[in-house]
Each structure stands twice: as C-alpha cells, then as structure tokens.
Amino acid sequence: MKSGAWTLVLLYCICSFGQDFAPKGGFVPDSETAVKIAEAVLVPVYGKKEIESERPFSAALETSIWTITGTMHCPGSKEGVITLCDGGVAEVKISKKDGRVLHMIHGK
C-alpha cells in the first residue's frame, strides 16, 4: 500500500475513535453545571448586568432536560414574602445528555 493510502487509513482510524464517548451522567450531570451553561449563553444575548440581577438561578431536571430559571427580585419586597411585580426572568432548557441548548427566552 502506498504511503498516501496508509495516511488515509490512519486518519480514518483516529477520527473514528472517541466519537461515541458520553459520560454516564450526561455532559450536564448536575444543576450547578446546568446553571453555568445557561448563564454562559444568556449573557451575550441579554447582557451581563441583566443576567447577574436574576441570580440565583434555579435548575430542575425533568425527562433528561434541565430547565434553568432566573429569580425575580421585586423592589421593596422582603425575603420570604411573595410580591407581585412587573418584569420577567430568563429561562433556558438544556439537554442533560449532550448539553445542547434547546430553548432560551426572557420574559417581560
């Protein structure tokens, strides 16, 4: 076999290894990782100041999809007291299996 053919065979073998690797717990195994990914994709779209103002973010897992939601901080509200106020928060849905961002929105 010529050296060019060996190079192609070697390249094929190298490229085919590792493509099926997936961590047992998925690429987004916990809520902390989900929140970090959500903040990373939200900041370029909605701005650092806006996203930081919605901390802490909560993450809930349902059917292998993380839903990450910001916290609404109403002016004049006290901790532990539910207050209605205008505005909305960010919400991101991320695949636990592969880390894909499936949905992203910000309420008004």
Image (cartoon, grey):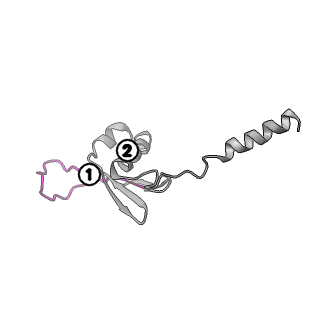
Give whichever of 22, 88 is nearer the camera. 22
Badge 2 is on which residue? 36
Q: Residues within 10 Å of mark 2 (few under 14, many from 20)?
A: some
Residue 18 falls left or right of residue 34: right
Quadrant in which the N terminus is drawn: top right
The stretch of residues the image draws in magenta is: 73-93
Q: Helix or strand or loop: what does disc 1 sit on?
A: loop
Of all residues, the one furthest to the bottom in this rendering is 63
Q: Say what amino acid the circle numbered 2 marks.
A: Lys
Badge 1 is on which residue? 71
**Magenta stretch, main secondary structure class:** loop
Of all residues, the one furthest to the top in this rendering is 3
Residue 45 falls left or right of residue 58: right
Q: Residues within 10 Å of mark 1 (few under 14, many from 20)?
A: some
Please name which of the two marks, 2 or 1, marks the residue nearer to the observer: 2
x then y, percent, for residue 24 = 46, 55
Q: Earlier in the sequence, mark 2 or mark 1?
A: 2
Residue 71 falls left or right of residue 76: right
Q: Which residue is painted at 36% across and 37% down in the image?
A: 48
Instruction: Answer above or below: position of 21 versus 47.
Output: below
Instruction: Give the quadrant of residue 80.
Output: bottom left
x then y, percent, for residue 28 = 42, 51
Quadrant in which the C terminus is drawn: bottom left
Q: Which residue is painted at 75% across and 39% down in the image?
A: 10
Residue 19 colored in magenta in the image: no
Instruction: Give the quadrant of residue 69.
Output: bottom left
Q: CA distance from mark 2 to mark 1?
A: 15 Å
Q: Say what amino acid the circle numbered 1 marks.
A: Thr
